Image (cartoon, rainbow, N blue to C red):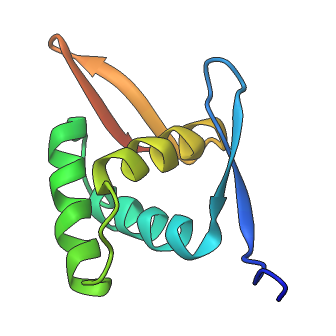
Amino acid sequence: MAKQSTKKVTVTYPLTGTERKMDTAIYEPIKAAILKSLKGSKGKTFTELSEEVTKIIKKQMPAFKKSIPWYTISVKRDLESRGIVQAFEEKGKKLNRLKK
């Protein structure tokens, strides 16, 4: 029996250029949750971002049992490499926001 093929997206880590494949079915909802969380924000810590993304994903995908914070950091870093999200430091805090 043939294994069912799932669509994959290549996720890139901005500092090293390392690439990893991720199911589109996971990538897209996490990406949308990150963008929703950061929209209109002047900056959020990763903890704040991760907590909001977790709430959004648990509502949208209640059966999802994998580590939402792990997927959040992976997708956030990919969005940084694509120039959509910006990581910056302010008053000694590492923050994230949508790139202007």
Looking at the picture, tell me which residue is in the foreground, 75 or 67: 67
Instruction: Look at 71% across and 60% down and name the residue there.
Output: 9
Looking at the picture, tell me which residue is in the foreground, 71 or 37: 71
Instruction: Look at 31% across and 54% down and name the residue there.
Output: 67
Q: For residue 47, what is the image quadrant?
A: top left
Q: Is residue 63 above or below residue 30?
A: below
- Residue 54's spot in the image, x, y percent? 22, 63
User: From the viewer's perspective, is 46 left or right of 77?
Assistant: left
Q: Is residue 89 above or below residue 44?
A: above
Q: Residue furthest right?
A: 2
Q: For residue 23, what is the image quadrant?
A: bottom right
Q: Is residue 37 above or below residue 99?
A: below
Instruction: Look at 24% across and 43% down and name the residue there.
Output: 42
User: From the viewer's perspective, is 55 left or right of 34?
Assistant: left
| Count of numbered badges drawn on the protein | 0
Q: Is residue 11 above or below residue 13?
A: below
Instruction: Look at 78% across and 79% down and name the residue there.
Output: 5
- Residue 3's spot in the image, x, y percent? 78, 80
Q: Residue furthest front?
A: 1
User: From the viewer's perspective, is 51 left or right of 28?
Assistant: left
User: From the viewer's perspective, is 43 left or right of 2?
Assistant: left
Q: For residue 92, what is the image quadrant?
A: top left
> Would you say residue 83 is visible in this rendering?
yes
- Residue 82's spot in the image, x, y percent? 66, 44
> Would you say residue 99 is visible in this rendering?
no
- Residue 81's spot in the image, x, y percent? 64, 36
Quadrant, the N terminus: bottom right
Looking at the picture, tell me which residue is in the foreground, 79 or 38: 79
